[in-house]
Amino acid sequence: MATLRGLRCRFHTNAGVFSPGGIDRGTELLIETMKLPAEGEVLDWGCGYGPIGIVAAAIAPGCRVTLGEVNERAVELTRENVRLNNVGNVYVARGDLFTWLPDLTFDVILTNPPIRAGNRVLFRLIEDCAQSLRPGGSFWLVGRRKQGIATLARKMGRCLADVQTVAAKAGYRVLRATDPKSIWP
Ligand SMILES: C[S@@+](CC[C@H](N)C(=O)[O-])C[C@H]1O[C@@H](n2cnc3c(N)ncnc32)[C@H](O)[C@@H]1O
């Protein structure tokens, strides 16, 4: 049980997935900070067992939230957690987002990225997300200062517009940037 954005949420987890002992502190900071439109397409990139996307769907019922994840067990847990939390406006998809993301577009992309995968993977994630944002869309990423979030902020600055730190707590930062196409057509 966790209280996120004032909502009582329940999550089943499992040893094989990210942060099985409870909501990660970075994830929680992103959830508490994220701003969503009244309607539109939202992506939770690398949803794990689903906390970011499930709360997004609950607080923005006019949006459709896609929760994408490569880990099969995490996807099963996300589907279970979607049912547990009674959210209907979601699409849960298993797959490598590097292969199918470029074909889709979103108004908001949210991610607590797989930091241990290294900068080559993280830079590709940022590039793909920048390409997949709709005009006026926003990209939100949480990370830890000591795990190199400054490097990711610089990469975001090369692919996206108006990169800002919108929250900082206990060594974590939430970065938000906007679609570059609306500024540099
Ligand atoms: C730091 S975890 C965050 C999980 C969840 N969003 C949360 O905040 O609890 C990053 C997630 O990205 C997933 N991931 C890594 N590479 C991926 C890929 N290529 N496509 C989709 N998901 C991926 C991992 O399996 C992991 O669940």
Image (tube, rainbow, N blue to C red):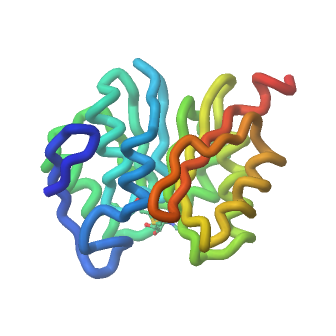
The N terminus lies in quadrant: bottom left
The structure residue drawn at horizontal position 21% and vertical position 38%, both measured from the top left corner, is: 6
The structure residue drawn at horizontal position 26% and vertical position 34%, both measured from the top left corner, is: 58
Residue 173, by quadrant, is bottom right
Image position of 184 (left or right of 107): right
Name above or below for residue 131 compared with residue 153: above
Image position of 178 (left or right of 89): right
Front residue (pair 14, 177)? 177
Q: Position of residue 35 (x, y in %)?
A: 46, 31
The structure residue drawn at horizontal position 46% and vertical position 56%, both measured from the top left corner, is: 169
The C terminus lies in quadrant: top right
Q: Is residue 2 visible?
A: yes
Q: Is residue 94 visible?
A: no
Name above or below for residue 111 compared with residue 177: below
Front residue (pair 88, 168)? 168
Image position of 76 (left or right of 38): left
Q: Position of residue 2 (x, y in %)?
A: 19, 54
Name above or below for residue 16 compared with residue 38: below
